Every structure is written in structure tokens, then in C-alpha cells.
Image (cartoon, rainbow, N blue to C red):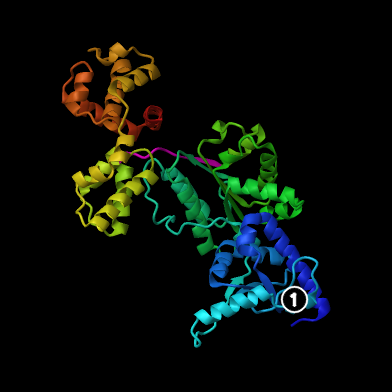
Amino acid sequence: MFDRDGGAELATRWARVRGRLRAECGETVYRNWLRSLTLVRRDGSTVVLSVPSRVVRDRVTNQYGDRLRALWSDEDPAVQTVEVLVSAGAGAVAEAGATASRAAVRPPAARVAADRRAEDEPEDAAPEAPVVLRAVEPTEALSAPLDPRFTFNNFVVGKPNELAFAAARRVAESETVPFNPLFLYGGVGLGKTHLMHAIAWNLREKHPQRRVLYMSAEKFMYQFIRALRFKDTVAFKEQFRSVDVLMIDDVQFISGKDSTQEEFFHTFNALVDQNRQVIISADKSPNDLDGLEERLRSRLGWGLVADIHPTTYELRLGILQSKAEKLETAIPPKVLEFLAHKISSNVRELEGALNRIVAHSTLVGRAITLESTQEVLHDLLKANDRRITIEEIQRKVASHFNIRIADMHSARRSRSIARPRQIAMYLAKQLTQRSLPEIGRKFGGRDHTTVMHAVKKVDELRAADRHFDEDVDMLRRMLES
């Protein structure tokens, strides 16, 4: 199969690959799934391995195929592919320290297992084709998988996320680096990860030659710790600093982890100095991230910081309508409006609610109605019931504008009093389920037309005055948090 000298060298490399795989995956995983891996031969740039069953082969290729390729490439860069065969009788190279001559010996247990399988399989069964693990770039193997649903075309744009969307699109489509870094931040389930995946998909499609590495901050830390453990920090630095686009999701995870921050800081500087694109996401702005070194916080704010605000009713309704079209299920508009009103926490929860009512309708064979929606989502709706009261809104707005609570109910009409009162009415309409007459009664027994006028006036001012809009939005977020 191969000569003694070449076989001994191959056996030694295989022993090192197995050793590293064992150390990375742990003893239990190794014993259950990887111990039966045997080396059959090397044909040019292809290494052929065998396993005793289809189940083991599928598990190995699906879960550990990328690492097998990467480890073999580390041992021998000439190796381009790895084939995994289902065959207990293809000779085995022994583990570390074994000689090449032992590789041709088939273990008795393997022969027995093969004989048993032969009895169970029909005589005319064709041999299975091997699973081929093709060599990939190191960044490809390291990069986290991308969700095919998360593209720019599937992202619903509204006022709360329009800046982040425009910035992400500019980065994805630009031939140069428009701003470095692009820092996206916002609460849970508002679309940060969606935009990160969309950028990566667009770059892979439009600029396939660019090396894109996307991963969570947690995985970055894990890779760094692993490099320290195996004394392989030089390879770690080269791997991360040779990419064209580095994308790190949920960077708040490294808060308080000084060694990881130190390495990330130097990686960030090296990429920026080479004019490579860096894209970061977090749940807070750089200035509000606790546990980060001041110099790192300063670097993260260098480029464009884009906030994704909490969703508005209109945006939530647009998202639901878009998702409903893709599900190809007839959903009454009143149901979508009901969901957009009742579930305002985040988009993931909103999509989950829509999937639940569609699944219930499909499985039970019951039409989707407002009543069935309330029944199916009773637990979710209960958790999302608005706890914001008009009294709470009045207190928050009065405190913000430094007026008295009594001014919310008074007849005073000076602008310093009337404008905060109109904002409080507007927020009461947006954040509570109270009717217009009920809201009016809470503001000194005013008529519902007064509330309507207040809502209209605040909408107009928000559209015309950016600072006013930000002020109202900040109050809304304070009340919703």
C-alpha cells in the first residue's frame, strides 16, 4: 500500500492528527465516535480514512469533518481532500508509536463486525461512495455558519433600523473600506445578527475573492485560549490578521476578560492599519460597554456607530406581513395587527408567535382567527401584557421636562407645560391599550379629540425636528426597558 519509510512518516502524522483531535473533542466524544477512525492510504493530495459503519461516518463528517481537514492541512499542506469510507477491512495504521507494517493488519473485532454486516446486507448491494471532505481556506473552516434566511432582501427596513441597514449595505457593496469599524448595537432580537449575516452573504456573492471571517466573540475567546493551550499563538495571529473582513458578533462577551481583550485590541489595530474591514455588534454602544478597557472602547467608536432602536408598531406589522407572505398562509390582517400590538419585546419572539399560530392551523386543521390566536399564544401574550400605565408615563415625562405631575392634569396651556403633556398623551396612545377617551380622562378630563390632536402634533414634530424625535424615542425606550 505504501513503503515502510513513507508509511512510518504518514503514521506519525496521523498519530499527531488523532492526538490533537482527541485533545480538542474530549475523551468521551473520542471514545464514542473517533477512536474507530483508521488511516487507509494517501493518494497524492487525498488522504483516505475508514470507519466501521455508516452511522459513524455520517457523524464524523458532519461534526468533525472541518477539523479533520484543517488538522491534516497543518500536518501536510499538500493534502487537499480527505475521503471517509465505510469499510472495516481496509488496513489500519496504528496509533502513535506504531509501525507501518502493523497498518496492514485488520483487527479481529473489525473482521467480526464486517462479517455481521455482510450477513445483514443484500448480496447485490453496491458499495457506498466515500464522503469527500474537500480542503477549505482556514478562515472558511473557522467561520461560523451563516443562516440562509438572513439576507438584505429579507430584512424589513423601518425608521428604527434604517441607519444600520444603510451602513451595512454600504460596507457589503463598497470596493473600499467606507468606515472602520462598523459598530452595530441594539437590544436582543432587533436584527444585529441578521445584518451581520447579510453582509457576509453579500460579500461571498459579490466579492468571493475576499476572505471573510464571521464568528461570535465567545468563539474568538475560545480560539485564543486554545492557541495559548497548544502554544500556537503565532498561527492564531496569522489566521485572524490575514483576513479581508473580520466580523465579531456580541463583543460584550469579552467584557472583563483582560487577556482576550488584549489580543482582540492588537488584532483590531493590525487589520485597521492594513485597511481591512472590521464589523462589530454588541447590545450597547461602545461608551456604555462595562468591563472594556478604555483604549479598546475608544477604538470601537472610531468608525460608524449605528444604533438599532426598538421596533415601532408599523415596523412590527411590516415584518409580520413579510413573514406571512413567505409562509404562503392566509392570515387575517386583524391577526397580524393584534400580534404587532401585543408583542413588542423583540422580532424573534414576534416571528416565533407567527410560526406557532401557522403550525397550529396546519396541524389541527383550524382556520386562523383572532380567537384561535389568543388561545394558542395565551402564555406568550400573558408574558407580553403591557405593564406600562398612564400614571407611569406621566411621572417619567414630568421628571424629564422638570414639571410637576399636577401640570399633566391642569388647564395651563403654556408651551412649557402643553408640549410635555402632548408627549405624554402620545406615549400613552403608543404604549398602552387604553382608548382615546380613557387617556383623555387621565389628563384632567380632556376630550378624546384633544388626545387625537396631541398624537398628530407629536407625529408632525418628530418628522420635522430630529432632536425632538430623539427625545421622544429616548422616553419611549426608558419606559419600555
Query: Residue beneath label 1, please?
Result: 103
Question: Is residue 127 or residue 66 the one in the foreground?
Answer: 127
Do we see residue 271 in this rendering?
A: no
Asked if the magenta segment contains residue 476, the reply would be no
Looking at this view, is 167 or 257 the one in front?
A: 257
| SS assignment at label 1 | helix
Disc 1 residue type? Ala
Q: Residue at x 50, y 57 (%)?
A: 146
What is the quadrant of the N terminus in the image? bottom right
Relative placement, left or right, of 56 versus 39 is left
Q: Check residue 305 for magenta coloring.
A: yes
Above or below, 387 relative to 253: above
Is residue 405 in view from this perspective?
A: yes
**Residue 31 placed where, x, y %?**
64, 60
Residue 64 location (% of width, % of height): 60, 62
Location of residue 311 (image quadrant): top left
Residue 329 pos. (x, y %): 25, 57
Please indicate whether residue 437 sits to the left or right of residue 408 in the image: left
- 113 vs 176: above or below: below
Identify the residue at horizontal 22%, vertical 19% (top origin): 442
Which x, y percent locates residue 127? 54, 83
In this picture, is 470 found above or below 392? below
The quarter of the picture where the C terminus appears is top left
Residue under the image location 24 percent in, 26 percent down: 454
| Magenta-drawn segment | 304-313
The image quadrant of residue 143 is bottom right
303 shown above or below 417: below
Circle 1 crowding by C-alpha within 10 Å: few under 14, some 14–19, many from 20: many
Left or right side of 368 for 81 = right
